[in-house]
Image (cartoon, rainbow, N blue to C red):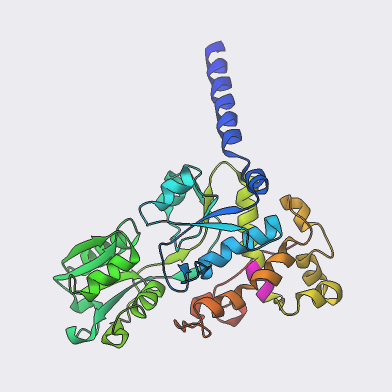
Amino acid sequence: MKLRYALATVFFSTAISISTAQAGTLDDVKSKGYLDCGVSTGLAGFSQKNEKGEWSGLDVDVCRGVAAAVLGDASKVKYKPLTAKERFTALQSGEIDILSRNTTWTHTRDTSLGLNFAGTIYYDGTGFMVRKDLGVKSAKELNGAAACIQAGTSTELAIADYFRENNMEFSVVTFDTSDQTRSGFESGRCDFLTSDQSQLYALRIGLKNPSGAIVLPEVISKEPLGPVVRQGDDEWFNIVKWVVNAWIEGEYQGVSSSNAADIRDNGKPGQKRLLGSEGDLGKKLGLSADWAYNIITQVGNYAEAFERNVGKESPLNISRGLNAQWTDGGILYSPAMR
């Protein structure tokens, strides 16, 4: 009995020590004065650097929103370009504070890597891009074809399942980065390129002849994309999770970068609570009362970020689809902000 009690005590103490050691990201970010954000090596609409060295994209805006909420300044972010194979190690090791890199939320990643997914910012699915001259109209015509795939992604398993279920065969040519995958497709090293459908549209506009490639109609998997943090730091997990929710709720409540200042003073109770002029939502997160106000005024609400980066105001021109609010035919939904 004493031995069991002693072992239980050691186990409990060790668990507390591990949890304590992993905690404290909020304090670390405040102390250094900026957020370390892991992004892609370059994917249009999600995380891409221009010739001036400035980053933009939907994933980038997540990190900008976290910086606005925590530091009061959306510009206080240092971006770390990561390949798909590098991304989880960088987060696990503490090299970055948050991973916002078109990353699919899966069971294996959520339960075995010591990581937490903090919500979904884009509902996607695995698709196929082929050259027009291949004459293919459906993915079911790709039996025996070669696939260009970025290594370390969930796409590999999704494609393997699809081909096996349809009694088809394929071969794989893998690459480390999105640019390498696109170049491999363009040079003819494979018959089709497969990735999340949003990425296919982003990769297509980077081809020398975008009109020479088509995206097939099939979407064969569920790929919810969102930011990731380390397990063991619930305070930081809650902050990132509710930054995403505030972003989405801002659109639902009709609060935008252009009207937030007026609504904070003259809006409805729910709007005022979101923006911090009423209630104590910020205090419960360990943040200032204007945390969500800072997100929306500096980054915009979800609709503003979507349209600017991947929607009708961008070269990708992707429709909202599933990423519309639940009231507009989509499945985008924030828990109640109260």
Residue 325 on image: x %, y %? 59, 76
| Residue at point 52%, 85% (across, down) | 312
| Residue at point 82%, 75% (across, down) | 268
Along the viewing direction, whichever of 260 and 16 lies nearer the viewer: 260
Residue 66 on image: x %, y %? 63, 59
The stretch drawn in magenta includes residue 297: no
What main secondary structure does the magenta stretch of the protein show? helix
Q: Is residue 315 left or right of residue 60?
A: left
Q: How many marks?
A: 0
Residue 207 on image: x %, y %? 31, 79
Which image quadrant: the C terminus? Answer: bottom right
Along the viewing direction, whichever of 168 and 155 lies nearer the viewer: 155
Q: Residue furthest top?
A: 2
| Residue at point 47%, 74% (across, down) | 45
* 228 lies above or below 168: above
Which image quadrant: the N terminus? Answer: top right
| Residue at point 68%, 72% (across, down) | 250
* 86 lies above or below 73: above
- Magenta residues (range): 247-251
Q: Residue furthest left?
A: 144
* 159 lies above or below 191: above
Q: Quadrant of residue 125?
A: bottom left
* 80 lies above or below 127: above
Along the viewing direction, whichever of 104 and 72 lies nearer the viewer: 72
Q: Residue furthest front?
A: 52
Along the viewing direction, whichever of 145 and 87 lies nearer the viewer: 87
The stretch drawn in magenta includes residue 248: yes
Residue 174 on image: x %, y %? 24, 61
Q: Is residue 29 left or right of residue 72?
A: left
